[in-house]
Every structure is written in structure tokens, then in C-alpha cells.
Image (cartoon, rainbow, N blue to C red):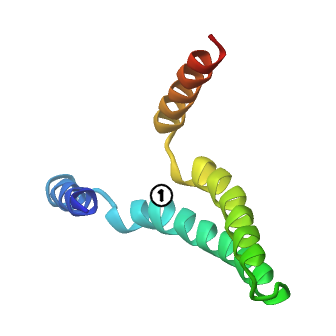
Amino acid sequence: CVYPLALFMDLYILHKYTRFPVQEFAGRNIILPLLFIIATGGSVYMIAKIYGNSSILNVIYTVAISTMIFMPLIYWCGLTKEERNYLQSIIRKKIKQISH
């Protein structure tokens, strides 16, 4: 909850002292990836919702499909290279713990 506010303040200060193009940065690095993730994942969810019946199996199916779509989208569009590397290191550690 605090992170977006801190990011906003950092960008404001950066713009104030260096004339950093905040609107261009936010559009290219924040808004466009977010819209891509929402549009792609949301369309898959809506297709599953439209063609499915209203049973518990459809809910489980929709959740599973949405998770399988959103996870890679967030990984590739929503994380920086450093965050992806950090996540990969955590997953590798967990796999090593399980395998030993």
C-alpha cells in the first residue's frame, strides 16, 4: 500500500530536480504493461466465463486458467530483470530443498 505512494513521491522529486519525463516513463513502464496484462488475462477469463456453466467445476477451471495466464504475463511484463532473477533464485532454492 505504501509502495505506490513512495514511487509517486520519488518520481515527483526526480521530475522536479532533473526534469525527468515522468509521463513518458509511467506510460511505457507502468501503464502499457498493466493494460496488456489486464486485457489478455481478462479476455481469457471472460471467454471461460461466457462458455462455462455456473458450477463449482467451472469456478475451479476459471481460476486455474486465469492463474496459468496471469503468472507468465506478470513474470514477463510486470517484473524487472532483477526481480525475475531474484524470483528464479528463490524457486531454485526451493527445488534444491525438495530434491535433497
Q: At 52% from the left edge and 36% from the top edge, which residue is drawn?
A: 81
How far across and how far down the image is residue 50, in percent? 79, 89
Q: Is residue 19 left or right of residue 56?
A: left
How far across and how far down the image is residue 92, in percent? 59, 22
User: 95 and 60: which one is in front?
Assistant: 60
Rendered image quadrant of residue 22? bottom left
Vertical arrangement, residue 99 with respect to residue 67, above or below = above
Number of callouts? 1
Please identify the quadrant where the N terminus is shown: bottom left
* Residue closest to the far right: 51
* Residue closest to the far top: 100
User: 83 and 61: which one is in front?
Assistant: 61
How far across and how far down the image is residue 57, in percent? 77, 74
Q: Mark 1 — residue? A: 29
Please identify the quadrant where the C terminus is shown: top right
Q: At 75% from the left edge and 88% from the top edge, which residue is drawn?
A: 54
Q: Amino acid at mark 1?
A: Asn
User: 45 and 3: which one is in front?
Assistant: 45
Q: At 81% from the left edge and 88% from the top edge, which residue is drawn?
A: 53
Rendered image quadrant of residue 95? top right
